[in-house]
């Protein structure tokens, strides 16, 4: 083939198509900002439509997000009671204050009784402690000093005076009172017609109630009288021990008086 008839080479142009400035990814950023702004708007509108309690919780979150970081979702779900708020704090403060008052009252009772020579031999048998329902004052029998005549619900003279004095102190409080009777595990052998330690413990609790209310303590302040027999031993390891025979006086917390 001659040089004059030679076919010219093919030239292939590849055109790279690309998006210009106005057709790039910038629109995605703008759209994301728009969606974010709309979400913020709806949240603001939702907050404004809620009551004062919700608005206050949301405001507290933005003031101190650390304390709400794990609970902020509860606001949107309406689970407001699970959050820390002023009401819960005030309830706890009131409870702590009441415990202080009851402890002071217990210390005053012990102090007054210890200064009275009539009760000097009984001071080691009076136990004061906090329990779930409130402050408990227990009169625990000993081998030499009994609060009841053996096998009966009749109080000794000393025990009757002691309970009256305690009742006078309790009358200064608005709290309701629970009285419990407890026996040891010795079967009651002196009764008839099915009289057991349940009856004995209940009768002793009622004898204590009468002594407590023989002074200034009104009968209306008594909330409940219970007889437990030997079902709640103070010393379970020794069910026949004297310490299991006792009268418990519980001063109920105000918030437990329903």
Image (cartoon, rainbow, N blue to C red):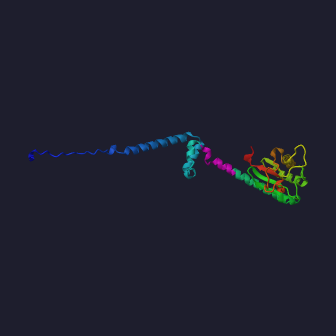
Residue 231 is situated, as x and y percent measured from the top left of the image, at 79, 49
Please check the rendered image and state whether residue 80 is part of the magenta-colored stretch, yes or no.
Answer: yes
**Front-most of residues 152 and 218:** 152
Query: What residue is rendered at 78% in x and 50% in y?
Result: 251
Q: Residue furthest top?
A: 49
Magenta region, main secondary structure: helix
Split into 4 quadrants, where in the image is the C terminus?
Answer: top right
**In the image, 91: left or right of 173?**
left
The part of the image, by quadrant, that contains residue 30 is: top left
Residue 112 is situated, as x and y percent measured from the top left of the image, at 83, 58
Query: What residue is rendered at 43% in x and 42% in y?
Result: 34
Residue 239 is situated, as x and y percent measured from the top left of the image, at 81, 54
**Front-most of residues 82 and 231:** 231
**In the image, 251: left or right of 204?**
left
**In the image, 28: left or right of 203?**
left
Query: What residue is rendered at 38% in x and 43% in y?
Result: 27
**Front-most of residues 221 and 132:** 132
Q: Start and end of the magenta stretch?
A: 79-93
Q: Residue furthest front?
A: 1
Instruction: Give the mark count.
Output: 0
Residue 52 is situated, as x and y percent measured from the top left of the image, at 59, 42
């Amino acid at each position: 083939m001659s040089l004059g008839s030679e076919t010219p080479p093919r030239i292939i142009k590849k055109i790279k198509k690309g998006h210009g400035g106005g057709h790039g990814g910038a629109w995605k950023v703008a759209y994301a900002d728009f969606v974010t702004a709309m979400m913020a708007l709806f949240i603001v509108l939702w907050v404004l439509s809620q009551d004062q309690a919700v608005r206050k919780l949301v405001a507290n979150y933005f003031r101190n997000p650390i304390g709400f970081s794990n609970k902020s979702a509860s606001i949107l779900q309406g689970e407001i009671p699970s959050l820390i708020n002023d009401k819960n704090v005030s309830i706890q403060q009131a409870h702590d204050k009441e415990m202080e008052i009851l402890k002071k009252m217990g210390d005053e009772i012990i102090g007054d009784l210890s200064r009275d020579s009539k009760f000097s031999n009984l001071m080691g048998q009076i136990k004061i402690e906090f329990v779930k329902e409130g402050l408990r004052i227990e009169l625990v029998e000993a081998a030499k000093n009994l609060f009841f005549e053996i096998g009966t619900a009749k109080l000794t003279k000393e025990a009757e005076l002691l309970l009256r004095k305690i009742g006078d102190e309790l009358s200064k409080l608005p709290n309701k009172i629970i009285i419990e009777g407890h026996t040891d595990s010795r079967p009651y052998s002196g009764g008839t017609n099915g009289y057991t330690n349940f009856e004995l413990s209940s009768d002793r609790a009622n004898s204590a109630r009468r002594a407590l209310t023989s002074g200034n303590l009104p009968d209306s302040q008594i909330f409940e009288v219970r007889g437990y027999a030997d079902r709640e031993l103070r010393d379970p390891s020794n069910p026949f021990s004297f310490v299991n025979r006792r009268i418990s006086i519980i001063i109920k917390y105000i918030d437990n008086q329903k």
